[in-house]
Amino acid sequence: RAFYAFALARAIPAGAEGVRMQCDLLACQNAGWQGVTLNTTRGHFYRAALEGLTAQLQRNLRTLEKIGHFNATELLLVGGGSRNALWNQIKANQLDIPIKVLDDAETTVAGAAMFGWYGVGEFSSPEQARAQVNYQYRYFWPQTEPEIIEGV
């Protein structure tokens, strides 16, 4: 099912042909879907949701950058959502920074195991346990033509 939705959304160009999702459901009177027509498909809804969530991420990141007096040069993603290659590319394009994705999305389990190793005395510190793990990353780079997403 997830792959089916992914394939549908991938066929929709950037901007979801005018369909938009305002994701701030609790604080915005315009929350929900805009631009829906009789020609709107499931792919439009899914693509618009990914783009809407990314817009919300962008607003939050800009706020964090302003408060913290820094500019993000890349974004590290972990967890289940990081498995969605289309969404990762949308984030790279919209945020205009590289998206770094851990190949093994199950970081919670790995972190618990590291603390477990430390807890049973296998390692002298959590840092030593962490040093034993060699993480592999993939990058998604911003593209100027978001509707042409190679390898996604």
Image (cartoon, rainbow, N blue to C red):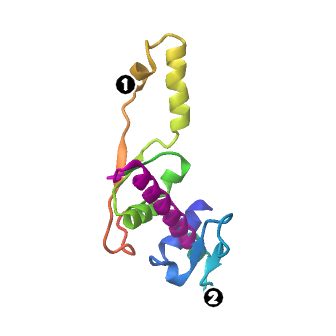
Q: Is residue 130 above or below residue 36?
A: above
Q: Quadrant of the N terminus?
A: bottom right
Q: Most prominent secondary structure in the magenta stretch?
A: helix
How packed mark 2 is, by other alpha carbons closer than 10 Å (few <14, some 14-19, many 20 or more), is: few
Q: Which mark is residue 37?
A: 2
Q: Are marks 2 and 1 in contact (CB under 8 Å)?
A: no
Circle 2: residue type: Thr
**Kind of element beneath mark 1:** helix
Q: Quadrant of the C terminus?
A: bottom left
First-in-chain label (2 vs 1): 2
The one of 58 and 94 positioned closer to us in this rendering: 58
The residue lying at 43 percent from left, 51 percent from top is: 67
Q: Give the residue pinned by disc 1.
A: 131
Instruction: Say if residue 152 shows up in the picture.
Output: no
Residue 93, percent across and down? 38, 66
Does 39 lie within the magenta span? no
Q: CA distance from mark 2 to mark 1?
A: 53 Å
The one of 67 and 144 positioned closer to us in this rendering: 67
Instruction: Say if residue 24 shows up in the picture.
Output: yes
Left or right of 1 in this view: 98: left
Which span is picked out in magenta? 47-74
Q: Is residue 34 above or below residue 52?
A: below
